[in-house]
Amino acid sequence: MVRDERRRQLLQAAQEVFVASGYQGANMDDIAQAAYVSKPVLYAYFPSKRELYLELLDINLTALGDVLQESVRSTKLNKERVHDAIRAYFGYIARDDGAYRLAFESGLSNDPDVLARREAFRRGFAGVAARIIREDAQLPLVEAEFLGRALMGLAQASARYWVENTAEQGSAALSLDAASELVYRLAWRGISRFPKET
């Protein structure tokens, strides 16, 4: 197997193990077994479980960031940007691979490298939201950045709540479209109420 293909195989297996077991419950034996390789092969690519986790964290946060960036680039209308970004966030959270768990839930929540990566993602997402808010509501930058963080928190908390309850409620749960639409309407009605300065 070509080195890049092997690396992708190991990352895929590791993601499945981390999502299923969490960081603390996962071990390199399980990851090697899931990838159908020996531990020495796994260690040849990744010197530790932590390094493997950090690479997966980077991959998943970058993927989510790319999805969100694309959603706001698809239109010039801020109302649609907010709608599309919230829908994209919910779509990412709803993925079958559980990637959001790896990105936002782990036993490494106090690890400085994990915290820094998550904060960089939050800062980026909040920055995109702040630009939309500032442009539409004509607010000072500090206020727009604060509201960008609030919007990011709203999307993150509601999407995680939705995906966890969807698993419990089954067919009685809100659809992805219905849930993201409700959050969008709440967010946009709030943002659009800010008076524009003249």
Image (cartoon, rainbow, N blue to C red):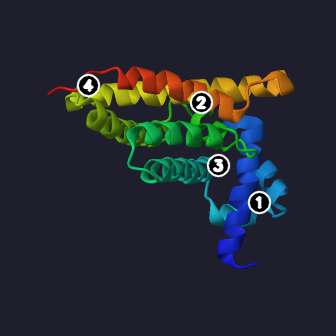
* Residue 26 locus on image (x, y percent): 74, 41
Q: Secondary structure at mark 2?
A: helix
**Residue at (73, 31) in percent of width and height:** 175
Q: CA distance from mark 2 to mark 1?
A: 46 Å
For marks 3 and 2, the one nearer the N-term is: 3
Please state which of residues 161 and 61 is positioned toward the viewer in this rendering.
Answer: 161
| Residue 181 disc label | 2
**The disc labelled 3 sits on which kind of residue?**
Lys
Q: Is residue 116 above or below residue 46?
A: above
Mark 3 element type: helix
Quarter occupied by the N terminus: bottom right
Pointer 3 residue? 49
Q: Sequence order check: which comes first, mark 2 or mark 1?
A: 1
Label at residue 39: 1
Query: Where the C terminus falls, by quadrant?
Result: top left
* Residue 112 can be seen in this image: no
Between 61 and 24, which is closer to the camera in this rendering? Answer: 61
Q: Is 148 rendered above or below residue 43?
A: above
Residue 108 is left or right of residue 189, and the answer is right
Rounded to the nearest angstrom, the CA distance separating label 4 from label 3 is 40 Å
Pair 3/2: label in front: 2
At 60% from the left edge and 51% from the top edge, which residue is drawn?
Answer: 56
Residue 189 image point, x, y percent: 44, 22
Q: What residue type is disc 2 on?
A: Glu
Which mark is on residue 143? 4
What is the C-alpha distance between the residues marked 3 and 2?
Answer: 39 Å
Eyeballing the image, is 189 above or below 29?
above
